[in-house]
Amino acid sequence: MYVTNPAEYLAKMPVRTLASSGAKTAEARLKAGHYLYFEGDQVDWLYQVTSGVLRLTRLLEDGRRQVIAFGYPGDIVGFPSAGLHHTDCDALVDARLQPYRRSVLENGEGDPKLHHALLQAALCEISAMQDHFMMLGRKSAVEKVASFLCVLSDRVGEDLGEHTQVNLPMSRADIADFLGLTTETISRTFTQLRKSGIIAINNIHTIVVLRPDTLLTLSLGDRN
Amino acid sequence: MYVTNPAEYLAKMPVRTLASSGAKTAEARLKAGHYLYFEGDQVDWLYQVTSGVLRLTRLLEDGRRQVIAFGYPGDIVGFPSAGLHHTDCDALVDARLQPYRRSVLENGEGDPKLHHALLQAALCEISAMQDHFMMLGRKSAVEKVASFLCVLSDRVGEDLGEHTQVNLPMSRADIADFLGLTTETISRTFTQLRKSGIIAINNIHTIVVLRPDTLLTLSLGDRN
DNA sequence: CGAGTTCTTGATTATACTCAATCTTAGTGG
DNA sequence: CCACTAAGATTGAGTATAATCAAGAACTCG
């Protein structure tokens, strides 16, 4: 889940259909806080998130952290590079996962349709990451946070009729490490959006988007 | 070319061998300043850079720009997402390109070996981009510039015996838009590295790495 | 209920940006 | 070949944004 321009995400949906394929294994479960894999591990399986939310992270020697992505239902995680995992991955909340053999991605092994679907998911990933570059490199704190909320709202927001409610299973530190900011800045920006009447904060993990249009405008950085 | 940790790049080398495959077309040439494709174009071909340097960019409505990558010899550019290009691509200097049909990547069409090589290149790309996230999100200006020079030095530096010479075909603005900084900051950081005796600046497009070890230390952000 | 973590808010600082001027380089035509 | 121009690079001064440091508030969970 690379949080950028909402429109980008529609292209990802076709992936959901791949679960209907033949060569699949029994669904796996991952409890909140437990790790699916670590950086450097051999890749044997890819996983499509069925429910729950995953967190993909990378560490620098000195402790600085980057959250690479959040894995929401429909997303595929675990793409290998040189056969190895290049992030850590753990669950923010209890999750269910559909595993696919790495060999299906790399060799097409017996299931060309699934092979193709996994390849398409990898290609989507590349394009989504490019969006995220723009966000990390060129957007202000407000733009980043607004973008983040916009995408979450579009992808997993609950329709409350008038407004949209968004659940944030991740901590402020996770959001900060995803957007290249500090927890303090995330907190301040949330407060600022709340005081402007753009969002409401029901509790730490639940916000309501009151003015989605304004939020979208902020995310695009119209400095009028 | 995602400038991060030098070690990452060794993994990319196997890709070079794929040019020996059967299903290839005549080499293409692209003059400096000319575009290979634009964002939104239909993807028909992927290209492996044979010589020269490409620039992949993305624009925001208000003119802010992100350089997504530089394409150096060995690199593959043009991976489709939903069949479309998601960056602009032009040549910084005259370049030669080996084209491969998109269908080889997506359907394996007639050449499983090439299909596999292109897929591996795409997977490498994902991991390299993850490195770049860390750089954009979590590194200081000095760390970014040092990282950039380290990788260029490793990949395309000319061995001058004692030192390593690096050619920079791109402008300061390109480097800035690649690293998420401004041209002024790039300039100042270069000057700072020069005054510290870590690099020498022969001319705007040619720098010499005098103390590679110190540069590497700086790139990793050891704040001692 | 209480301890510990996470979040929020405030005050201050630092890093990198902005704006502006100067210098350098590359390209053009006399 | 050299002056002239335009674009790009450097440097400086001042500023703004987000980071840091620190304290207090609000959650979480045993």
Image: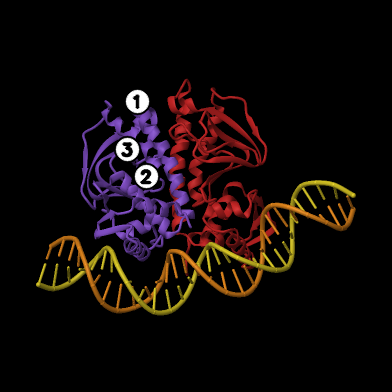
Chain colours: A purple, B red, C yellow, D orange
Q: Secondary structure at mark 3?
A: loop
Q: For residue A18, which quarter of the picture? A: top left
**Hey, what amino acid is under mark 2?**
His
Same subunit, labels 3 and 2: the answer reads yes
Looking at the rendered image, the quarter that the N terminus of chain A falls into is top left
In the visual, does C14 lie left or right of D8?
left
Label 1: which residue?
A113
N-terminal of the pair, mark 3 or mark 1, is 3
Is A202 or D29 nearer to us in this picture? A202
Q: Are marks 3 and 1 in contact (CB under 8 Å)?
A: no
**Residue B200 placed where, x, y %?**
66, 61
Q: Secondary structure at mark 2?
A: loop
In the visual, does B201 lie left or right of B46?
right
In the visual, does B13 lie left or right of B204?
left
Label 2: which residue?
A85
N-terminal of the pair, mark 1 or mark 2, is 2
N-terminal of the pair, mark 3 or mark 2, is 3
Res A59 seen here: no
Q: Is residue B82 above or below residue B60?
A: above
Is A110 or C6 nearer to us in this picture? C6
Label 3: which residue?
A44
**Residue B174 placed where, x, y %?**
59, 51
Q: Nearer the viewer, mark 3 or mark 1?
A: 1
**Hey, what amino acid is under mark 1?**
Lys
Q: Nearer the viewer, mark 1 or mark 2?
A: 1
In the visual, does B47 lie left or right of A81?
right
* Residue drawn at the location 31% of the way across and 48% of the way down: A153
Q: Secondary structure at mark 1?
A: helix
**Hey, what amino acid is under mark 3?**
Asp
Q: Chain of mark 1?
A: A
* Residue drawn at the location 37% of the way across and 44% of the way down: A85
Q: Give the spatial CA distance, label 3 vs label 1.
A: 19 Å
